[in-house]
Image: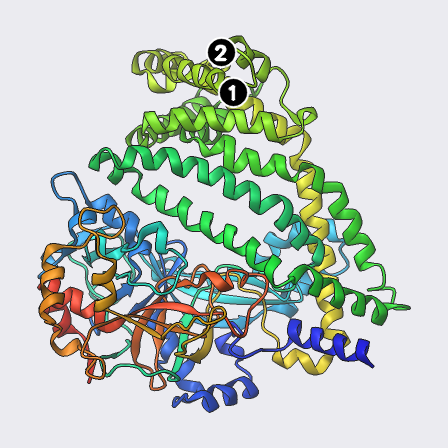
Amino acid sequence: MKKLILSLVLFASILQTKADEGMWLPMLLGQQVYNNMVKKGLKLTKEQLYSINKASLKDAILIFGGGCTGEIVSDQGLIFTNHHCGYGAIAGASSVQNNYLRDGFYAYNKDQEIKSQLTVQFLVKIVDVTAEIEAGLKGLSWADRQKKLQEVYKSVTDKVADKENGLAGRVYSMFKDNQYLMYVYQTYRDIRLVGAPPESVGKFGGDTDNWEWPRHTGDFSIFRVYATKDGKPSEYNKENVPLKPKHFLPVSIKGIKDGDFSMIYGYPGGTNRYETSYGIKLKNEIENPALVALRDMRLKYMHEQMIKDPAVKLKLASDYAGIANYWKFFDGETKQLIKFNTYGQKQEYEKDFATWSKGKPDYENIFTEYEKNYAAWTPYSKHRQYLREGILGSPLSSFVSTSLIALETVMTKPDATPADIKKVVDAVEAARKNFLAAEDLPSDNKILAAVAQAFYNDVDKTQHPAGIYDRIALYGSLQDESTYKKWATDVFAKTMVLDNDKWNAFIANPTAAALQADPAFDFTAAFVKNYTAKYAPLYTAFVSRNNELGRSYMKGIMEKNPAAVKKMYPDANFSMRVSYGNVKSYHPRDAVFYDYVTTAKGILEKYVPGDYEFDLPTKQVELFKKKDFGQYIDKSRNDLVIGFITTNDITGGNSGSPVIDANGNLIGLAFDGNYEALSHKIAFDKDLNRTICVDVRYVLWCVDKLGGATNIINELKLVK
């Protein structure tokens, strides 16, 4: 009986919703899930959440750039998203003379708004295309199925493509290739920067506070989407006008209470909550520790240079933020997976599945095959991480890998024409220009030396590329750090990539021999070619077999308990989802209580003048000390609320997502998760999981009181 109860509990923990777990498809929101939302406090109808024929909440939500979420908050196409989502555009608009990243920026009229290279995508509709996809793949083996999959996708999406109106379809695999949905998007390409707080506000707390609560970060930025006068998508054009959206979110400054309903729409990037114990073991023991160590190394050398020179900080800011964000995430993920024994829980469920599957040919050998597949790949997993996060973590090596190796490939083709070579040379020239503009030589020099030594020390020497460490050994002992420093300094001094005279001579007469003689190319190509020839095929086979097994396993899970299917949601895959929960305080550990909000008082307690992470604009400090909070004050606390936490289920890609109250009003912007639940990509924790949000009242206070952009406030529909 005890074993049976344990199996049932484990099954429930893996398949069914716990507390506020769930990234639900808005089109397929089941009645039971909707009823649960109503019980939590939702006041809207299903049709108000998602409708094809009428304006609904989904029409105010958009894909922002390549990997974030944004929301429309006015009838003039105004967009709110996170500061870190707009970071690249803000940095790109900045210069040393007009440093909008450091000082902040607000357009006080539309003529002052700044052009960007960003795009946004609105969801038009969702269509279940499972029958069409399966018909196109009928009778094929797994290998042939994978080869034909994109062709079949294209045959489906071609039917909705409309270039003139910016319409295109994208097929998403759900439940590990057991269902296929096509999302139809409309893409707009004229996106302009409207406002951003100073970086000291938008990144307050820096890496120290990243993934932590309590949090006091004003993580927001503001953009606007423009269209032609008849509302069609267009490239940037001075004649374009602000888009008239189908729906926009009213903005509530009424405030929040512990227990209030909260809903988040957005585009969560990826989860793997049906991962096996084998995957968790590999992640815990090899993949995550390697990634964390190598990113830590890169961040150290970048930070050393950034604190010395504002121009370098501006140059490296975007890359540094991206590297740092997931350095801490994967470190925390491993610790939480171990703490909660997720590996052991998965093993117990897999034992139960194996018992159920006996005598069922489609399922009974799944875990035997998983074991074989992981055993075949695991010896090479560290190699792959040390190449991707180490060797190619050097910007110089990354440029060589993405540009010069491609050039060599074309030049060594027997049938390559001069026109073919020129086309690639022109592309490489453009890539080099971008690389040099972003390159910081001192930090990259140190990174190259460090990653070369790390690969030598940590990766099985039978997997090393032939000859490369023999050449490095000419500079001294391979056990000595100074050897790698001398070698790296020589590479930077001699590579034509960093020498205009050598580069121009090469471009005038590009040959494979000249390329291969370059020390930067010699080093990078040795690692890339070694991996490509020997280990990339093994990795491809590993992933393909895992996916094949995963499809069968997922099908078996649903067959094992059909009643649970209605309570299941597919893993996140950057398709629109909705999650629901509540504003909620929590106890992270014994004797510790975390309130559900942070306030201006807490910012002043953290404030350290001149500090890299905890400085603030002088004006903000003065206004806070005066308690000049205007209409944005929380009267119950006589303070300005900065951030709050909810129990919503989100992940990367949800950055910038609107946090919406029971009536469909914007109350905040989601921007982070909490450290105690960083295992959320693999396993949701019903007690500790929290989404960290910037309160919209703080956003508006920064715009109004700190930035003086009352024109933006006047554009909003405020709910008081």
Q: Single out the mark in the foreground, 1 or 2.
A: 1
Q: Mark on residue 271?
A: none
Asked which secondary structure carries label 1, the reply is helix
Mark pair 1, 2: CA separation: 10 Å
In this rendered view, identify the residue nearer to me: 621 or 323: 621
Residue 77 visible to the viewer: no
State left or right for residue 342 relative to residue 44. right
Q: Mark on residue 523?
A: 1
Q: Work out whether 137 lies above or below 455.
A: below
Lower position in the chain sequence, tag 1 or tag 2: 2
Q: Work out whether 4 lies above or below 110.
A: below
Given the current orientation, which residue lies at the most extreme front position? 591
Given the current orientation, which residue lies at the most extreme top position? 474
Residue drawn at 10 percent across, 65 percent down: 623
State left or right for residue 614 relative to residue 16. left
Residue 47 x/y as whole percent: 42, 86
In this rendered view, identify the residue nearer to me: 235 or 516: 516
Residue 330 x/y as whole percent: 51, 51
Residue drawn at 74 percent across, 64 percent down: 553
Residue labelled with disc 2: 517
Mark 1: few/some/many CA within 10 Å (<14, 14-19, 20+): many
Residue 86 x/y as whole percent: 29, 54
Identify the amino acid type marked 2: Ala
